[in-house]
Amino acid sequence: MGGKLIVFEGVEGCGKTSQMQLCQAWLQSLGVSVVLTREPGGTELGLDLRRLLLEKVDHKPIAQVTELLLYAADRAQHVEQELKPYLAQGKYILCDRYVESTIAYQGYGRRLNMSLIDQLNYIATGGLQSNLTIWLDVDVEVGLARKRGTEAALDRIEQETIAFHQRVQQGYADLAAAFPERIIRIDGSLSKEIVHQTIQGILRDRLLLG
């Protein structure tokens, strides 16, 4: 069985973490070797970059292009150190965020130059695309309310304006419309169990799982 890269995407509070854990348990029950990872922070270097990117320091804001370059650096390290080796070993990788996040957040949210983003994504990935991207679509305000309902403090990105997060959401919608064969929308407002069952069905159909 060849390795597969399955990416989970969506706005803040869409339920990616829970669904990845459920998906991992299900795939393992089928005898599939599974790895969970994330961006930013999927490598030792990435953990340091994640802290720089997500901790909010009011008197030392991160410039938007700097933010973009840090995400690209995290991805380049992640692809070389984790994704390519695991795929070569035939593992199924469940990845929390990948190139679509950069397009949605830095392209649509920050309104940075999309050609620059595409170039950096290609440099960072060497052209490595997901086999399948699961977009968990929830209303922005619902997702943020979920985040605020947890004990964890909101990070720098989560504290952005509603307008910013709405632009991000539009980015995901446009990506799903442009690449329907690879990016699959799932209604993330449904129950955790129904969402998981839907993901199972998609993986069975698209990846020929038993």
Image (tube, grey):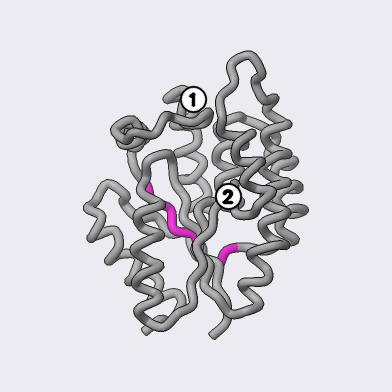
The residue located at (23%, 60%) in the rendering is: 193
Q: Position of residue 135 (x, y in %)?
A: 43, 53
Q: Is residue 178 left or right of residue 127?
A: left
Q: Which mark is residue 151?
A: none
Q: Position of residue 13 (x, y in %)?
A: 37, 41
Look at the picture and state if 191 lies above or below 168: below
Q: Is residue 165 magenta?
A: no
Marked residue nearer the N-terminal end (2 or 1): 2
Q: Position of residue 58 (x, y in %)?
A: 59, 16
Q: Give the labeled residue for mark 1.
A: 160
* Residue depth check, mark 2 versus mark 1: number of the one nearer the observer: 2
Q: Amino acid at mark 1?
A: Glu
Q: Write the start and end of the magenta stretch as one range.
A: 130-137
As helix, strand or loop, the secondary structure at mark 2 comes to loop
The quadrant in which residue 154 appears is top left
Label 2 – label 1 distance at C-alpha: 19 Å
Q: Amino acid at mark 2?
A: Glu
The residue located at (70%, 39%) in the rendering is: 70
Q: Position of residue 41 (x, y in %)?
A: 59, 48
Could you tell me what secondary structure mostly forms the magenta stretch? strand
Q: Give the labeled residue for mark 2.
A: 39
The residue located at (34%, 63%) in the rendering is: 22
